[in-house]
Amino acid sequence: MFLFILTNFSFSLKFFAEGSRIEAAFRKYIHRASPKQKQDTYELFVCHGNVIRYFVCRALQFPVEGWLRMSLGNCSITWLVIRPNGNVSLRTLGDIGHLPQEKITFK
């Protein structure tokens, strides 16, 4: 077990400004399909790990502060499934198995 203690840690005003943009993106892109939809659809997001962590917490209805406890490697794959009834499943979080060993930045 590792224990890291952050000292002199504070949120900047930029964090809160970006937070509203991330929430707006979540509301725009993460939702159940229209009842008229007849086939599966897939959305691909290439973005900062903080955005992925926030989306995961919101989609799973966890407290959004929980994203601070997650770590995602660069170029990792996260896969959320949103079913027509609104149930959400996290299939994969931060998978880096597709990367060669020398390309992994966090070990």
Image (spheres, rainbow, N blue to C red):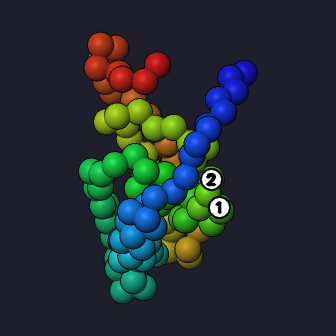
Q: Residue furthest top?
A: 102
Residue under label 2, please give it: 66
Residue 86 shows in this picture: yes
The x and y percentages for residue 20 are: 42, 73
Compared to residue 32, the image places residue 77 above or below, namely above
The outermost residue toward the bottom is 36
Q: Residue 84, how many percent across, how many down?
A: 50, 74
Q: In the rendered image, is residue 56 in sight?
A: no
Residue 23: x %, y % from top left: 44, 72
Is 86 situated left or right of 35 in this image?
Answer: right
Query: Between marks 2 and 1, how big is the CA–CA gap?
Result: 7 Å
The residue at the far right in this view is 1
Q: Residue at x 51, y 68 (%)?
A: 83
- Image quarter hosting the N terminus: top right
Tell me whether circle 2 and circle 1 mark residues in contact (CB < 8 Å). Answer: yes
Residue of label 1: 62
Front residue of 79/12: it is 12
**Left or right: 96, with 89 as reference point:** left
Which mark, residue 87?
A: none
